[in-house]
Image (cartoon, rainbow, N blue to C red):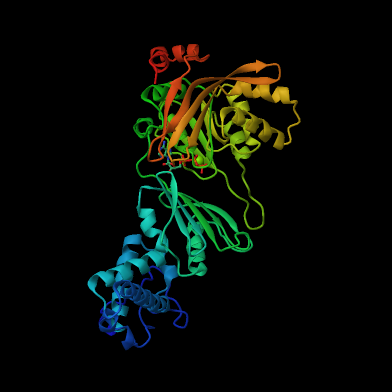
Amino acid sequence: MFGKRTAPLSVVPSSAPPPKPAETKPALHAVPSPAPESKDKSPAKAEAKPAAAKKAGLEERLEEIKGKVFADLIETVDLGELSKMSMQAVREELSDIISEIMSMRNFSLSAAEQESVITEICNDVLGLGPLEPLIARDDIADIMVNGANKVYIETGGKIELTDIKFRDNTQLMNICQRIVQAVGRRVDESSPICDARLLDGSRVNVIAPPLAIDGPTLTIRKFKKEKLTLDKLVSFGAITPRGAKLLQVIGAARINLIISGGTGSGKTTLLNCMTNYIDKDERVITCEDAAELQLQQPHVVRLETRPPNLEGIGQVTMRDLVKNCLRMRPERIIVGEVRGPEAFDLLQAMNTGHDGSMGTIHANNPREAVSRIENMIAMGGFTLPAKTVREQIVGAVHVVIQAARLRDGSRKITHVTEIVGMEGEVVTLQDLLVYEILGEDKNGKIQGRHKPTGIRPSFWDKAKYYGLESTLAEALNEGA
Ligand SMILES: Nc1ncnc2c1ncn2[C@@H]1O[C@H](COP(=O)(O)OP(=O)(O)OP(=O)(O)O)[C@@H](O)[C@H]1O
Ligand SMILES: [Mg+2]
């Protein structure tokens, strides 16, 4: 059957040097002789079983077929060469080969079953295997793989276990490897931690055994195709329309801003929304560990940190990036996540005429955000008196916006807080808008309201300077 092909199904591009015969895997030569399936798996026999058992039997049979076809495929095709072809071309080529293997092995499958085997194998060879259907969904925020048998997802702010499983940890590890290789990194026993990014921009973290005790652990923060805007956050109830106006003024009037929040509370999303209000003429430089921000302005320079290579050299830290930014004539500097001594450099930037700089920080409330910055500066080995550091913070950061994921899974902006000054050694904060929890409805959904405090912000004059006085008045005066 395979011999009938006029052109070989070779996946080696014609420009590649001709490989030596002994090393070559001819396109389709090594398919083992057809082994008819064992009789006791016939559909007739299965029919006698109860429906559930029958379904399980069918699934088992499909799995077995998939395993055999996969083994033949590995024998047949030089998978390394596939990476040089376009995704679509590879998929078509593989589909042809897999169909041929199946008919040669006499696997009697319905058209739908055959299609499912082809799709799964293509996903396995080219994509993220069993994770592909999850990657295709846009309602998932996070995919969390804890070893081969446990795949969790987060949708609507809630985490749930899926029934997706990998064949084994080797398959999972191969997929992790493929993901990180795509960005020129490697993950194995000697370097078991790795950050990467999927082609669609999703942020990925892999931690492998022996550090991860129960098998390779993969965490994916899915990239949302549909970009969230402040209007959308309003429609989700994360903030009121008036609150959104306040944020808009903060973004446009070049107020130095820290967005604070817990893991997955929506900090990066909010930062992204805020950047929409940056003027098109401003030169913006972003520094991130894994590029997630999607600024729409024309004049943006995007920088990304780099981990050390296998010899332990070549690392470029966030601090290096932020320091370098200052020599790049930035008008605003945006730090995806401030988590270490770069806090000091960001404060310096904010204090030295780069108004409107922004960053996110892991903290549970605005006051904690201030002490986190203080701690980060101390961790960086700067031996400045606490009061001096606090004065620096007060001089640099104008506003802290707090994001939170509440216990019902909803994400809210819970505080818009100004840093106004010092009283003795204590930093004084002033809330402009707070979210008040009033109770819970019968479905466990939290009921609450955003309440402006009615305080006139100290950045009023700045807003006026940018022609935003009336917007600010509207945002603050007319209630929630
Ligand atoms: N207000 C919101 N309503 C609904 N979903 C939201 C909201 N804000 C963010 N999300 C979604 O929540 C997920 C996490 O958001 P995001 O990446 O912004 O969180 P984060 O705080 O930056 O997380 P991390 O701490 O991991 O960096 C994303 O899928 C995002 O689309
Ligand atoms: Mg983030």
Seen at 63% across and 51% down, the residue is 308
Residue 289: x and y in percent read 55, 44
Residue 263: x and y in percent read 53, 42
- Residue 430 is at least partly visible in this image: yes
- Residue 283 is at least partly visible in this image: no
Seen at 44% across and 15% down, the residue is 466
Image position of 260 (left or right of 311): left
Residue 331: x and y in percent read 51, 26
- Front in this rendered view, residue 442 or 143: 442
Residue 394: x and y in percent read 62, 21
Q: In which quarter of the image is residue 262?
A: top right
- Front in this rendered view, residue 393 or 429: 429
Q: In which quarter of the image is residue 38?
A: bottom left
Using the image, determine if residue 109 lies above or below residue 39: above
Using the image, determine if residue 214 lies above or below residue 423: below
Image position of 205 (left or right of 41): right
Using the image, determine if residue 253 lies above or below residue 12: above
Find the residue positioned furthest to the left.
111
